[in-house]
């Protein structure tokens, strides 16, 4: 397989109170650059989280929240001036909450088109839900058990690690 288009990538994951972005709010954001630099932010929220979120996501949070304006400044500083590509596993929800944080799809510090890894998997003949299957991680030699699923930073770490191994794997 060829080389990726760019290494100017920031791997992203978000956690939020509800799948419906009209009802939900951001809980946390994990960002990891291709080079491994990390940023993790937890947000203040005012809506009641969905019961699934209460059970699976809230226990992964530290409780150290920041207001949205401070978070936006932290993100801009972390991202830098080059508008890196944002990559999420399935970016539809992550992108909606990301755009909501910045208020406009073009007023944020990343390239305006988000990249989703599920589509990359599909394009290379893999089930787009491969990251939900242990056999996929075994094939890449990744121990999924070292990551805390549904923690935005660990999910972004896992995505970065999968991406790097995926492109290093023979035949991909």
Image (spheres, rainbow, N blue to C red):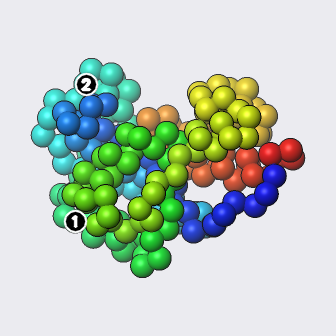
Whether residue 64 appears in this view of the structure is no
Alpha carbon distance from label 2 to label 1 = 26 Å
Answer with mark 2 or mark 1, whichever residue precedes in sequence: 2
Q: Residue furthest top?
A: 51
Q: Residue at x 71, y 33 (%)?
A: 126
Classify mark 2: residues with Cα within 10 Å, few (<14), some (14-19) or many (20+). Answer: some
Whether residue 44 appears in this view of the structure is yes
- Foreground residue among 152 and 106: 106
The quadrant of the picture occupied by the C terminus is top right
- Foreground residue among 111 and 57: 111
Where is residue 94 shown, x and y percent of the image?
39, 45
The disc at residue 31 is none
137 over 41 or under it: above or below: above
Q: Residue furthest right?
A: 170
- Foreground residue among 40 and 104: 104
Is mark 2 in CB contact (under 8 Å) with mark 1? Answer: no
Instruction: State how many labels appear.
Output: 2
Where is residue 31 shown, x and y percent of the image?
45, 57
Residue 44 located left or right of residue 11: left
Q: Residue at x 74, y 34 (%)?
A: 125
Which residue is denoted by mark 2 in the rendering?
Answer: 50
Which residue is denoted by mark 1 in the rendering?
Answer: 70
- Foreground residue among 108 and 55: 108
Q: Residue furthest bottom?
A: 81
Q: Residue at x 33, y 22 (%)?
A: 52
Q: Residue furthest left?
A: 46
Q: Quadrant of residue 74?
A: bottom left
Secondary structure beneath dot 2 equals loop
Classify mark 1: residues with Cα within 10 Å, few (<14), some (14-19) or many (20+). Answer: few
Secondary structure beneath dot 1 equals helix
Where is residue 2 shown, x and y percent of the image?
79, 57
Q: Residue at x 65, y 36 (%)?
A: 122
């Amino acid at each position: 397989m060829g080389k990726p288009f760019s290494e100017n990538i920031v791997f992203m994951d978000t956690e939020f109170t509800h799948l419906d972005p009209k009802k939900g709010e951001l809980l946390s954001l994990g960002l990891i650059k291709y080079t491994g630099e990390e940023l993790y932010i937890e947000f203040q929220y005012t809506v009641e989280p969905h019961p699934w979120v209460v059970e699976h996501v809230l226990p992964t949070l530290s409780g150290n929240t920041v207001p949205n304006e401070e978070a936006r400044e932290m993100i801009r500083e972390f991202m830098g001036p080059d508008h890196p590509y944002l990559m999420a596993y399935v970016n539809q929800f992550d992108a909606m909450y990301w755009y909501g944080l910045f208020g406009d799809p073009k007023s944020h510090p990343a390239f305006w088109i988000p990249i989703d890894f599920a589509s990359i998997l599909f394009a290379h003949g893999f089930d787009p839900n491969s990251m939900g299957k242990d056999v996929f991680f075994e094939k890449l030699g990744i121990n999924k058990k070292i990551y805390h699923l549904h923690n935005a930073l660990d999910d972004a770490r896992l995505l970065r690690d999968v991406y790097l191994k995926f492109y290093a794997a023979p035949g991909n």
